[in-house]
Image (tube, rainbow, N blue to C red):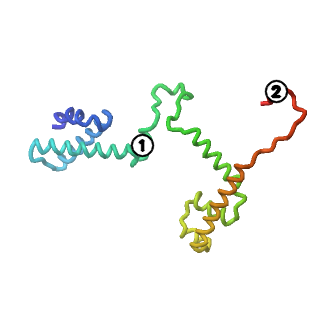
Amino acid sequence: MALARRDLLLRAHRFRLRREDLEDCFSQTTMELIARTRAGGTFKSRHHLANVIEQRFLSRIHDRRRALSGRSPMQSALETAVPLDGAHEHAAEIADRRAEVEHLAMLRDELAQISRVAGGLTYDQRLLLASQVGLQMECAEFCHRHGWSTEKYRKVGQRARARLRELIAAENERVPLIEARSEQGIGTNL
């Protein structure tokens, strides 16, 4: 019965997954039904068996689609990975299509800027921001550890973020000083 339904089901559901994935789902379905039969399971008729095969097959397809959409980090990573077929000799030519180089460079620059101006914050403000960003500690745990009230936690955090914004804005407004040179040679000196 599985062989008779195989081609029909693979054609009928070809829009749901790639051919290899559909065949894998069908194989899993077949193995499950064989195991059920060996354990003593029976089916009322050939029609009942055909319905069970289709139902199990659809269930495997839905499971596979959930895994590919992110429920399974490994399957999601494998799905978005760049194939290396025959490209191992030219590893330098492989580019990560997901990389956002400009965005990453801007984020790193912002992080470096925060690191430069963080000295302008008080100790409590730095401690609070580090616990929120680095340790991702909740308010209750932080207050319990450091003996703070929730109101102090809220106010220090509010002031720390406002002060950090001020320090970053002040650094962005600052223009780097260049030595005045009246004795420059001809040219642009780039």
Q: Which residue is mark 2?
A: 187
8 relative to 177 in the view: left or right: left
- Which residue is identified by label 1? 76
Q: Is residue 90 or residue 172 the one in the foreground?
A: 172
* Residue under the image location 23 percent in, 41 percent down: 30
Q: Would you place residue 40 above or below residue 179 in this image?
A: below
Q: Amino acid at mark 1?
A: Ser
Element type at marker 1? helix
Of the numbered discs 2 and 1, the one sitting upstream in the chain is: 1
Q: How many marks?
A: 2
| Quadrant of residue 144 within the rendered picture | bottom right
Give percent across and percent down for residue 59: 26, 46
> Of discs 2 and 1, which sits in the foreground?
2
Residue 173 on image: x %, y %: 72, 49
- Secondary element under disc 2, as helix, strand or loop, is loop
Q: Residue furthest right?
A: 183
